[in-house]
Amino acid sequence: MIRAKDLDQFIGIEDDRDWLDAVRVRLYETWTMATGHGPRSRGRSWACEIYHGCRSCNEHLSVPCSLAREANEIGAFLGNQCYTDDPTQFARLYLILLSEFVGQLKDVAGLLEIRLAKPPKHLCMWANCWAKHRLRFLTLHHPIVLFEDDCGGDCSCAASENDLTYEDACGQRFPCYVIDSRWLESRGSRLPNIEEANRPQKAVIVVPSFDKFLDETIRYFRGFVDECLKYPENVKRFEASYRSCC
């Protein structure tokens, strides 16, 4: 049972934040080791791979240069401890940053006329349905937010199987219902209606492991890099002639 007086530990407002900082460090290491992009990365990154694989002389190619800035920003965010005091805030910024990045990759792929699949569905669903529009969830009267990285497993199953109840400050008990990936996928961007918002149940939002979102982003990023390397002439089109040495 979840009690109002114990709510802090469920929404992440607690003194012990070691779990989130440990997750952040793991995400930072995963991103930088896979892509080579960090706060001050220079060389041996995926953007540099495009640069060296597509240039024919000593051109300053716009695409890999701009891409490096965007990819390095993700490394800079993950390398910063500033947001680990608030797991919900960290999750929102993290999801927005990753979803904007893959969205830009898709846009640039269109400019380059290279083939790239749609951005990762799971990542974009959480970013668009929750992270970018959290205000609408407040109509559900302060839903509880759980994190799989903190729970150490599938919180959705645990919450459902244990038939969670919520006890408010007056001692009244209400059943909980879970808002997870399956819920978001079935509901999409539809707003909660009045009946849902006011029914005597407590909403529990279960955020999947942060690793899942990063893995999707890395795979999508790699797909973009590989397509650029297949069509170097398309990448070279976005370069002003006065910047070329040849």
Image (tube, grey):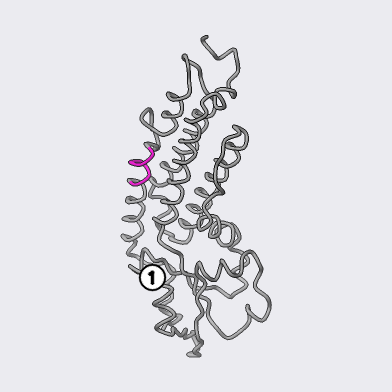
Magenta region = 30-35
- The residue under the point 68% across, 78% down is 194
What is the number of callouts on the image? 1
Rendered view: 102 above or below 153: above
Choose between 186 and 80: the one closer to the eye. Answer: 186
Q: Which amino acid does the dot numbered 1 rest on?
A: Asp
- The residue under the point 38% across, 28% down is 42
Lateral position of residue 165 relative to residue 192, left or right? left
Q: Quadrant of the N terminus?
A: bottom left
- The residue under the point 46% across, 36% down is 226
Lateral position of residue 152 relative to residue 101, left or right? left
For label 1, the SS is loop
Rendered view: 26 above or below 87: above
Check residue 89 for magenta coloring: no
Q: Which residue is mark 1?
A: 154
- Where is residue 105, by image quadrant? top right
Q: Position of residue 7 (x, y in %)?
A: 43, 75
- The residue under the point 53% across, 60% down is 126
Choose between 237 and 27: the one closer to the eye. Answer: 237
- Where is residue 161, by image quadrant? bottom left
Q: Position of residue 208 (x, y in %)?
A: 43, 63
Q: Residues within 10 Å of mark 1 (few under 14, many from 20)?
A: some
Lateral position of residue 197 relative to residue 101, left or right? right
Q: Position of residue 47 (x, y in %)?
A: 45, 32
Choose between 121 and 93: the one closer to the eye. Answer: 121
Residue sticking out furthest to the top: 246
Q: What secondary structure is the magenta-colored segment mainly? A: helix
Q: Position of residue 92 (x, y in %)?
A: 51, 57
